[in-house]
Amino acid sequence: MKSILVKQLMVPLEDYATVSEEATLYEAVVALEEAQKSLDPKRQKHRAILVYNAQKQIVGKLSQIDVLRSLEPKYEDIGDMKAISRFGFSREFVTSMLRNYGLWEKPLQDICRKAAHKKVKDIMNTPGKGEFVAEDATLNTAIHQLIMGQHQSLLVTRGEAIVGILRLSDVFEEVCNAMKACAL
């Protein structure tokens, strides 16, 4: 497979769904929907929203999981979900958590109020050091970062500036296309 650079596969920042950290959950969902409309139909749909601060710098990501988790505030009682999720759960354990914590008893009740009042900054994820990749890095480097960090995407940098996002779905599609191009 020829050497592919991250910048060849990334989605430029201006083509991705973005929202202010002061926006509401409702505004974020609308921004995602609007970004989907202008997306090239050959590309995978966006699965996250990038969050910017008052200086227009990207400071976080809001994923589908973040949105769903924010609708059920009792998840905060459970603790560090990222650490807990590494253990893997049996079906019985998940069911007992649902019952013991009273999760998802009425999460969609009053969803309009929740969406209008929840601020993006309160539910977004702040990217860690392993979630950035240089635009001139090779796809091999990016794949390693995606796998080791179990990330759905990486923020692409040019110097200190974030210029795009590299999505796992685009990387996977590129790898699959390379496999299919092989003469077996």
Image (cartoon, rainbow, N blue to C red):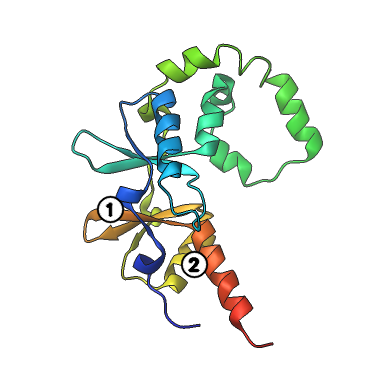
Image location of residue 85, percent across then percent down: 62, 42
Residue at 50% over, 15% down: 112
Query: Is tag 1's residue or tag 2's residue first in the polypeptide sequence?
Result: 2
Residue at 36% over, 40% down: 60
Under circle 1, the secondary element is strand
In this view, the residue farthest toward the right is 92
> In the shown orientation, is residue 38 left or right of residue 59?
right
Q: Examine the rendered structure and indicate whether residue 148 appears above or below residue 61.
A: below
> In the shown orientation, is residue 93 left or right of residue 178?
right
Under circle 2, the secondary element is helix
> In the shown orientation, is residue 79 left or right of residue 52?
right
To which residue does mark 1 refer?
162
Image location of residue 109, percent across then percent down: 60, 13
Which of the numbered marks, if any, corresponds to residue 91? none
Considering the image in quadrants, where does the C terminus appear? bottom right
Q: Indicate the quadrant where residue 10 lies.
A: bottom left
To which residue does mark 2 refer?
144
In this view, the residue farthest toward the bottom is 183
Q: Examine the rendered structure and indicate whether residue 82 appears above or below residue 96.
A: below
